[in-house]
Amino acid sequence: MSNDAIRLRSVTRKYGSGGTSVTALDEVTLSFPRGTFTAVMGPSGSGKSTLLQCAAGLDRPTSGSITVGDTELSTLSETKLTLLRRERIGFVFQSFNLLSSLSAEQNVALPMRLAGRRPKKAQVREVLEQVGLGDRARHRPTEMSGGQQQRVALARALITRPEVLFGDEPTGALDTQTSREVLALLRGMVDRDGQTIIMVTHDPVAASYADRVVFLVDGRVNGELLGPTAEDIAARMTKLEATPC
Ligand code: ADP
């Protein structure tokens, strides 16, 4: 089995055609080794969301190849791609996207139900405990803080034991202290459980929890930093944002 959880080779994604076409990703080649935490950063419009969407099988590139483990995504039908997303990939977003009428445990069990599987109570409890919410299983989202709601969303993403967890600004709606708690939780999942995480963020402090920060500019990879401090990342971002187009 490949040592990379996800691999992109010369991935290009164009939107539109002719004179108005936009190249959101331009020949991007990147590997995300298993058990590592990568942050993706770059100025607005640099292709971060497009990269996440393509790598997660939510969008298809115009050309190039993306593999999840040993599975080449371009060969999959829409149905198979949906199954792959459901079973092998987890997502957390800036907005928690929880159903307010359901309890924490019902929200967490939802992906299993949608996949037609019967969620085991013990399994639901286990992931809730993993995110520090073992005692909140019966609470509804409205009875929880933002940080707790994001933890429920994390537990929901983890219930299928995904090979890769994608985060799109997962701490974007949280205050500083709560962000740190959620980031420490993500870091712990990588260190303790060997989870692979790929996270888009604007926040240099959030990115400093990652093993590696990949920078995008105009749809291309513009270098990376390994084990960087928040100050290193902030300095790099300031430089990138100052670069004229
Ligand atoms: P980021 O997440 O870094 O802000 P995006 O991936 O959202 O960047 O966008 C990269 C580029 O692709 C931008 O120029 C954006 O306007 C363009 N783009 C993104 N999605 C679409 C779309 N659905 N249709 C047309 N252009 C798009």
Image (spheres, rainbow, N blue to C red):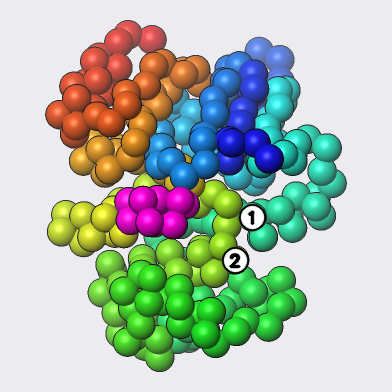
State the residue position of label 1: 88
Relative to residue 179, is residue 157 drawn left or right? right
Secondary structure type for disc 2: loop
> Tags 2 and 1 in contact by the CB under 8 Å rule?
yes
Which image quadrant is residue 38 in? top left
Secondary structure type for disc 1: helix
Numbered circle sitting on residue 207: none
Give the x, y percent position of residue 225.
32, 23
Which image quadrant is residue 138 in? bottom left
Magenta stretch, main secondary structure class: helix
Q: Amino acid at mark 1?
A: Arg
State the residue position of label 2: 160
Give the x, y percent position of residue 159.
54, 69
Which residue appears farthest toward the bottom when viewing the image? 138
Residue at 15%, 29% (x, y): give it.
231
CA distance separating discs 2 and 1: 7 Å
Residue at 21%, 41% (x, y): give it.
205
The stretch of residues the image draws in magenta is: 187-195
Asked whether the viewer can see residue 123, the reply is yes
Q: Amino acid at mark 2?
A: Thr
Which image quadrant is residue 104 in? bottom left
Relative to residue 115, is residue 44 drawn left or right? left
Which quadrant, please, contains the N terminus? top right
Residue at 51%, 63% (x, y): give it.
157
Is residue 174 in the magenta section? no
The relative height of residue 184 versus residue 212 in the rendered view (above or below) is: below
The relative height of residue 155 versus residue 125 in the rendered view (above or below) is: above
Is residue 192 in the magenta section? yes
Residue at 50%, 69% (x, y): give it.
156
Which residue is nearer to you in this view: 48 or 20? 48
Give the x, y percent position of residue 72.
75, 36
First in residue order: circle 2 vs circle 1: 1
